[in-house]
Amino acid sequence: MCDDVNQHRRAACEDDGRPMSEGRRRTILGGLFGAGMLGLRALATGVPAAILANPRRALADTDPTTCASPAKAQYLILSTSGSGDPLNANVPGTYDFPAIAHSLDPLMAKTPFKLGGTSVEAAAPWATLPQPLLDRTTFFHHTTLTNNHANQNKVMRLMGATRRQEMLVSFFASQLAPCLGTVQHEPVVVGASGSGEFLSYQGRVLPALSPSALRDTLANPAGPLGTLQKLRDADLDRLNAVFKAHGTSQQRAYLDRLAQTQTEARGISQALLDNLSAITANDPTNQVLAAVTLIKMNVSPVVSMHIPFGGDNHTDTDLAGETKQTVAAAGTLAFLWQKLTDLGLQDRVTFAAMNVFGRTLGKKGTTGRDHLANHHATVMFGKGIKPGVVGGLVPQAGDFAALPIVSATGAGDPNGDIVFSDTLGAMGKTLGMALGVSPDALDMNIMLGKPVLSALA
């Protein structure tokens, strides 16, 4: 994971089997939970970090939040790949054209399934996903306007469509963090396959944190998760004294409503320890465990990971590698849904998979796939998303391209009001609205495209 990382960031992501030093552990803890373990203390008590940090100032604030609609805000787990995986090759919409090549392996057989009340056809792995997950899943056909691996960072900036060239995840995180009360605004990277998949926040490149490093830092009975109850009791005693002396009856009642009980604190601690103890490596399954744990601990509004769907498969006889990885990827998504449900996060987290570009669909048959700038498919699911398919495909230049989109219906149409070159921006705005970002902020920060309202719940 760390081969391409600059030396000054290497310590944050290396995992070479050596025991973790105490200095490195402190660095990770401070980065995740802030000075004085403020984030862990917020988790233990259920009280926002701002109140824990300065309760008397919080008492004086009539409106301490800058978020217009906290109830709509979602955390984001983003899977991204600089390899340009063939994620676009086997989703609903690709079986409408006989010229599109698919693996002949029975594991990838064309299979009907339901997205909401609509029947669609795609490769069999997609049909294996739990129906409650499919009932909030959309497949969004669009372009990324590039076929170059090196442009991964540009795609994360919607190829120039974001204000001040900010990465989409950076913009989302800055909007969502005040709503969610996370410890930090910056996204956390738990899966980066090479330096091209590192993210930035307001221009600053973020380090990666491997799942095993997170486990070694936290999954220790004598570590911070094992002390949640002590943290809770100490902070609540302090806050109760402040609120009793200086707060109103309404403010004291507010604190009582927020505060976690001892049983809740113990349950949170054990559930997170169980997740972290189950981490055995740094592969996608273990990235899921790390991602959901970080979100349950309210560390960051955005966590990124890497789920392979076939990789850079120019030469892939019988599309065997694509088959193996797509089957595994569906299993990873099902596991993610299970873990979100286990931790009560299924209505709080939105997932999206978006890569640097798609792959050719027909020109090489089943011998492999080349880079394709004209078509990609982003997969997204969450409480704010209606199930379905947005956009579509059209034969072009010996292969295929994404169609323009009708913003009101999501249909792919040559005359759609979202033109081909704006479909990437439209995907970004649609995802942003599903996350609870305000339409005004989206219009101000994403200059191209319109949200597809039919894809929003």
Image (cartoon, rainbow, N blue to C red):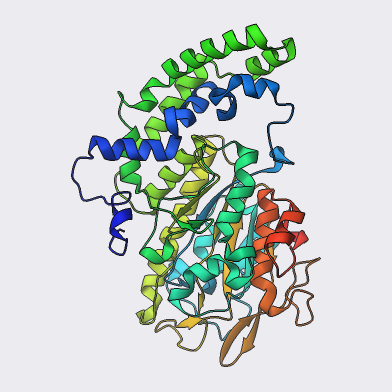
Q: Position of residue 377 (x, y in %)?
A: 58, 69
In the image, residue 212 sits, relative to residue 198, either above or below, namely: above
The answer to whether one can see residue 109 in this image is: no
- Looking at the picture, does residue 63 appear above or below residue 83? above
Q: Residue at x 31, y 61 (%)?
A: 6
Q: Nearer the viewer, residue 137 or 239?
A: 239
Relative image position of residue 77 (x, y in whole percent): 52, 51
Relative to the observer, which residue lies in front, 236 or 387? 236
> Which residue is at the far bottom?
397
Q: x, y (%) of residue 89?
A: 52, 74
Q: Residue at 68% across / 57% down in the picture?
A: 387
User: Which image quadrant is residue 162 in?
Assistant: bottom right
Above or below: residue 48 compared with residue 395: above
Q: Nearer the viewer, residue 50 or 258?
A: 50
**Residue 118 quadrant:** bottom right
Q: Residue furthest left?
A: 18
Q: What quarter of the picture does the N terminus occupy?
A: bottom left
Say which residue appears at 37% left-offset and 73% top-offset: 320
Q: With 73 as the anchor, is 359 left or right in this view?
A: left
How many marks are shown on the rendered structure?
0
In the picture, measured across the screen, residue 241 lies left or right of residue 366, that is right
Q: Position of residue 203 (x, y in %)?
A: 51, 59
Q: Decide if residue 284 is in sight here.
A: yes
- Residue drawn at x 74%, y 26% is 62
In the image, 188: left or right of 405? left
